[in-house]
Image: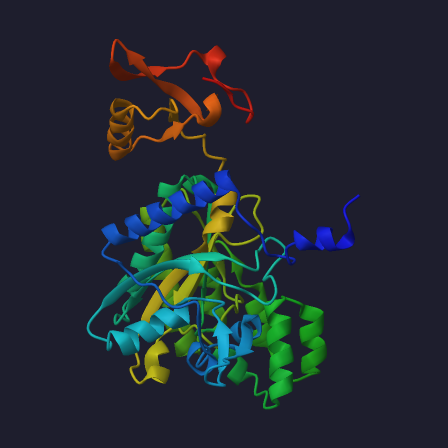
Amino acid sequence: MPSSLTTRAWQLPDGIDELLPGAAAQVEALRRQLLDGAARWGYQLVIPPLIEYTDSLLVGVGEDLDLLTFKMPDQLSGRMLGVRADMTPQVARIDAHSLAGQGVNRLCYAGSTLHTRSRSLAASRSPLQMGAEIYGDGSLSADIEVMDLMLSLLDDAGIAASTLTLDLGHGAIYGPILEAAGLDDANLRSQVFDAVQRKSRPDLEALLEGREGSLLGTLMDLHGGVEVLARARECFEAMPEVLAALDELEALSQSLGARFPEVALYVDLAELRGYRYHTGAVFSVYAQGLGEALARGGRYDNVGAVYGCARPATGFAMDLRLLAARLSEAEAGTAIAAPQEEDPAVQAKIRELRAKGETVIVSLGGVRDPRCDRELVNLDGDWQVQVLDSSAVAPGGNGAKA
């Protein structure tokens, strides 16, 4: 019986997982496919560092991201380091500082992140984040482009559009409504924010205790199809800032509805994710039967101000692990079995096949790898590839004699 020490030696922390060969191959194929897809739209790849000083990594971001970030002292400088929980602030720093905020920049990235706790039951604490951002353009066209790219990449990955719902909100709606309620106490405002986000009317009414806050209660009910936008116009007709945000959501829903008619559109005006961070449209993509969003994004203008270069920005990010898990398991790749021989002719043939993109696996000890559906055979001095008889292909993963 294994000792407790031996058992602990192979245990991983909660929410931290490893990828075994099949899943790892699928995630890596997705990473390459999505980055190549973004490149065809003009997005340039950047690779930010895994850790940074926290006064750079976390400056200007919301409290939620601060709480998600692992922190530790740097033994060289004595300054505090953070392991990135989200790559977006890093890419914003690259745009504003390293690239000096020149013109419109389209940037994409993919890399590991680490969270102190899971964001949801379905989420990993070590997401493999892939994303794309546009810096330097504050127009609605940029928001439409990143959402178009996001949905197009999901389609390319094999996620059926008919199974997706695009959830739309706006970061500039809640603020004016909260100000109209006249709540001065910071702690009360925080509790009201939490109640609205949870759509808990009893909690909201208990917190307001007769104060004017009817519009906050109204906001909680404004979720559903695009018809919600018309209802919202009637409710907030005296609030120009809210009406301007509703105009943007109307334009977005029309454009995306025309481009992706099979994707269901859902409007949630009480979606307050990233409220202190997002300044414009926010969006999430959900798939049927999956509680966690496949991708999230939004507009966050002036994000580079903390680096000395205020820049409009919009973009999205997705977890490649979650996306890969959503897809059906990829079929095993085909391979060619090669004999374990030092014959220069067979070695040259193996190099030739690999150079052409074929997977060639040497049958060490005469045992053929079960992934092989073809074999390299010597026919009258000429090494050729032949398809294996299905009865000769090794079942399962045990291998078979070549």
Instruction: Relative to 212, say whether 397 is above or below.
Output: above
**Residue 295: percent from the left, percent from the top?**
45, 55
Q: Is residue 108 left or right of residue 84?
A: left
Q: How has the structure been colored for display?
A: rainbow
**Residue 253: percent from the left, percent from the top?**
38, 56
Q: Quadrant of the N terminus?
A: top right
Whether residue 272 is visible to the viewer of this picture, yes or no, is yes
Instruction: Relative to 331, say whether 223 is above or below.
Output: below
Q: Residue at x 57, y 44 (%)?
A: 289
Q: Is residue 53 left or right of residue 355?
A: right
Closer to us: 345 or 321: 345
Q: Residue at x 52, y 84 (%)?
A: 179
Whether residue 176 is visible to the viewer of this picture, yes or no, is no
Closer to us: 51 or 119: 51
**Residue 25: percent from the left, percent from the top?**
44, 41
**Residue 382: percent from the left, percent from the top?**
24, 14
Q: Quadrant of the C terminus?
A: top left
Name of the residue lying farthest toward the right: 1
Instruction: Relative to 24, say whether 101 is above or below.
Output: below
Quarter where residue 48 is shown: bottom left
Name of the residue lying farthest toward the top: 380
Instruction: Relative to 5, say whether 64 is above or below.
Output: below
Name of the residue lying farthest toward the left: 103
Q: Is residue 108 left or right of residue 296?
A: left
Name of the residue lying farthest toward the bottom: 184
Closer to us: 291 or 180: 291
